Image (cartoon, rainbow, N blue to C red):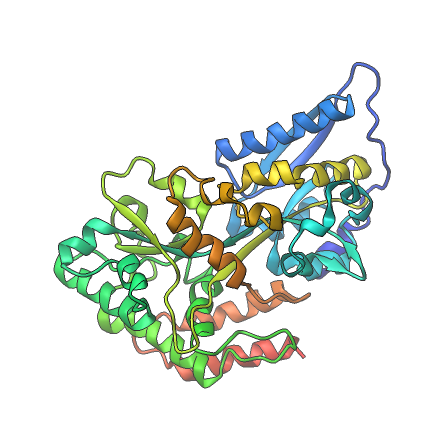
Amino acid sequence: CFALLLSAAGLFAAGNGEKAESGKSVSIKIVTWTSNQAQLDLLNSFVQEFAAKKGIAIDPVFETIPFAEYTTKLALGLQSSTPPDVFWILETSAPAFIESKVLMPLNAQLAAYDVSDFSPKLLELWSKNKNIYAVPFSSSPFFLLYNEDLFKAAGIPTPAELAAKGQWNWENFRKSAAAIKKATNVWGYQTVDGQGYDARVLHNLLPIIRSYGGDAWDEKNKVAIDSPESIAAVQMFHDMIFKDGSVVPPGNQSDFFAGNAAMTVAQVSRVSKLADVSWKWGIAPMPNGPKGASPILGQAAIGAAAKGKNATLAAELVAYMTNKECVARMAGIWPPARVSVMDSKEFLSSNKAIDSASMKTAVADSLKAGRVLPSHIQFPQISVESRTFFDKLWYADADVPAIMKEIGTVYRKYIK
């Protein structure tokens, strides 16, 4: 199981052989889930700056693992003969990675880079017993992207226009999606990355569930996935798919970025996919529910392998890559956890494709109000076992309350 994989990963060869022999470079393996060349080039620039500062040569080897299989393959890679030195970590995996002791404590290395500048709220998940085990380089709110041309074609106000009037809620989100499908025969909504029925099912459902007053489970490990509020939220989304026919259904590959849906949920890093579209698009915050809006923060951290042969150098590299200057340069792609960058005017103009007003309402404000997905040391097992029951939701005749109760039973098996 995943926990055993991580425990075993902690046994791979120890040492701190980061000093290169004369005339030779140090090879540093860096694992991420991005394949975007511009993003990899940015990360590489940090590596080269760090190497120059250290007076050594570093040869970074970047490896990309697809998001849907990232954590499992990373855990296996940590057992291999060529484990990564530096790697990205999903927020849901944080407790398991910390507990397994595969992460190098970073306190000593971060001391030179003003640790107090990090938001305590955003650093909390990655810390334990006063040790910082990874640094969030991205705390990116999910917001709504929309195709303005399709809203105009349907003769209805855009999400941004509704938000400006205080009328942007899930009820109007549903009405908008249905109106666009009826008027244009284009889907009203596509789930996040088209993966809202499988790899990103919680990214898809939790913004609705939490804004209705439900949750998956809370900070005190109280399971609420089958509460009346959670059930009502999921039922609403289910009805959009199977009663309204306004949502791209499971198995359908229609893509918002290709103009095949009017709305989707995305993050700042996805906006680059709109660079060459022929239609006008816009950004809006997540809709409100009975309990307000509850945007999800997709948090990703970067850590160093505790027992890699380049452990100390890798930890120093992580600290450098998350200093104020580097974070400011990443902010237009990956929203920051450093308060000085988060509160700066430069952050609001850090992405040339997003105007400052939209960056404030959909990103900066949501960054402060948003919450990460719930995490647990046994999250991988919870995710795998509950997926069978989530899969049962995506049929027209699904008994939503009964299925949510089944998911609740799985959660309570692990979350106590």
Please give left or right for residue 291 compared with residue 339 in the image: left
Q: Does residue 391 appear to the left or right of 238 in the view shown?
A: right
Q: Residue furthest front?
A: 345
Q: Percent x, y for residue 307?
A: 81, 44
| 104 to 49, vertically: above or below | below
Residue 134, image x and y in percent? 70, 50
385 horizontally vs 302: left or right:
left
Q: Which residue is drawn at 44% across and 67% down?
A: 207
| Residue 2 visible in the picture | no
Q: Residue at x 68, y 49 (%)?
A: 117
Residue drawn at (57%, 54%), measured in percent from left and top? 299
Q: Position of residue 358 (x, y in %)?
A: 38, 50
In which quadrant of the rendered view does residue 120 lie?
bottom right
- Quarter of the figure with residue 58: top right
Image position of 19 with respect to 131: above or below: above
Above or below, 360 relative to 28 = below
Asked whether, in this view, residue 150 is left or right of residue 89, the answer is: left
What residue appears at the point 76 percent right and 57 percent down from the top-left corner?
A: 100
Percent of width and height locating residue 143: 41, 56
Question: Can residue 170 be seen in the rendering of this structure?
Answer: yes
On screen, residue 273 above or below 246: above
Q: In the depicted view, which residue is nearer to us: 407 or 367?
A: 367
Of 261 and 114, nearer the camera is 114
